[in-house]
Amino acid sequence: MKDRLLLLIESNTTGTGRRFAQRAVAAGIEPVLLSADPGRYPYAAEDGLRTVVVDTADPPALWPAVRELAADAEIAGVLSSSEYFVATAAEVAARLGLPGPSADAVRACRDKASQRRLLAGAGVPVPGFAEAGEVAEAVGAASRLGLPVVVKPVQGSGSVGVRLCASLGEVADHAGTLLAATANERGLTAPTRILVESYLTGREFSVEVVGHEAVAVVAKHVGPPPVFVETGHDLPAALPARQRDALTACAVAAVRALGLGWGAAHVELRLDGAAPRVIEVNPRPAGGMIPELVRHAHGIDLVTAQVRAAAGLPVSLERDRDAGASIRFLTADAAGTLGPAAAVEEALSRARAVPGVVDAALYRAPEAPVGPAEDFRGRLGHVITTGPSAAASARAAQEAAAVLARALRPSAEPSAVRSPARGDTASDRKETV
Ligand SMILES: Nc1ncnc2c1ncn2[C@@H]1O[C@H](COP(=O)(O)OP(=O)(O)OP(=O)(O)O)[C@@H](O)[C@H]1O
């Protein structure tokens, strides 16, 4: 019998990418990573993952590589955990007659301007928005929408380039910077359009959707403006049933309006008063280790579900527990370094010893320079905790994150994970449990 392969077209870099390959192996399918630069994913070498080096940004180059793999194996499925390659994976899957989302729907969703138009057109609430291709247009849009506004690239992930602008001068500066960029953080061609949006100050949540079913509601924490760095998540979000139902209904309506509904979608929303508005829909499972939190809190494995759906295998979304799970990311408040190896090791082992901790990690080498995060790339490590409730897991995560912060050199300001008591304002707080 021929080997069965799951083709993984590039990967995300924040943890769950590795899980896609592991879950494929668990389903009896060999994962193969197709990547222009596999060195970007250290786990690939560590796990001995079969890898094909190919220009994944160039579909005509990708197809012969896929055909070659198909010559002596059965391609069971094609996926990407990277925001930037979900449409490519959908296209390859469709060409092979394999399951996957509509590549057109994914493409429309990934362009935040077209996503906003589709959602607004279908009556799904979104912030006020305008698309701009020039600085003057962005400034005009900001005047019309009313300051402050959020200015962001039309494509992207991890909050890269997303900025709160308090004055028209800041709008002009940031719009100018974004419009001048020719490549995104992946080195891929960046569209020369941006979005200007009304700033929603309410608490932020994500709803994890599979097909048309909401399987989890996550409360999110973000660092201080003007940037938007996700610093933590708590699951399940502590909310009155009415608000939770409003969030899940809005998220599922968004998925439907975008013509998605195959596999996982990650829907971010903010409350505007009591009513939810969609910040963004990602046509893929969440990053930021959220699938791990969902697994710990509810026993539902979103990555397994995605891998099995891609391979046409039955998927279980049965919730077998109702526990709490939290993550806090380590960030630095000021420039400094990580401590020497011994200090880093000690901080890690002490963080792991905090009751409730199931995982602690640092992403940088000892003595590496650190500085305040501008986007997800500035996060330095994380702790994941579980507990009988989200309040308990959140408390444990705060404590463990403070311990992990001891890995930072004293010259760096005490860092870390901002505790809600330490100055989170209504405007920068995504949610506290
Ligand atoms: N209109 C808005 N009002 C309030 N906050 C916003 C708005 N737009 C974006 N944000 C904040 O910025 C963050 C990142 O924005 P967005 O989701 O559009 O960018 P992204 O690069 O796709 O980020 P990510 O991959 O982290 O979701 C959001 O999670 C939210 O906290």
Image (cartoon, rainbow, N blue to C red):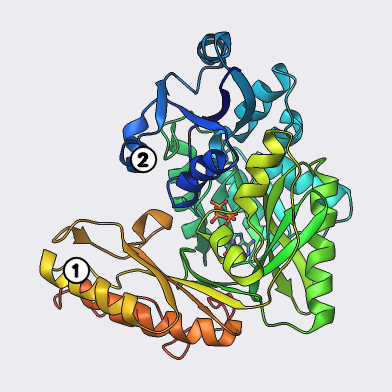
> Which residue is located at x 68 percent, y 82 percent?
238
Ligand 1 is in which quadrant of the figure?
A: bottom right
Instruction: Please identify the residue farthest to the front as the structure is shown.
Output: 1
**Residue 423, placed above or below residue 130:** below
> Which residue is located at x 89 percent, y 49 percent?
122
Q: Position of residue 314 (x, y in %)?
A: 76, 43
Q: Position of residue 26 (x, y in %)?
A: 55, 43
**Which residue corresponds to mark 2?**
47
Label at residue 345? 1
Instruction: Please identify the residue farthest to the right as the structure is shown.
Output: 122
**Residue 125, placed above or below residue 96:** below
**Residue 18, placed above or below residue 433:** above
The amino acid beneath tag 1 is: Glu
Q: Is residue 116 left or right of residue 191?
A: right
**C-alpha gap between disc 1 and disc 2:** 22 Å
Secondary structure of residue under mark 2: loop
> Which sits earlier in the primary sequence, circle 1 or circle 2?
2
**Residue 132, placed above or below residue 300:** above
The amino acid beneath tag 2 is: Asp
Q: Position of residue 399 (x, y in %)?
A: 38, 85
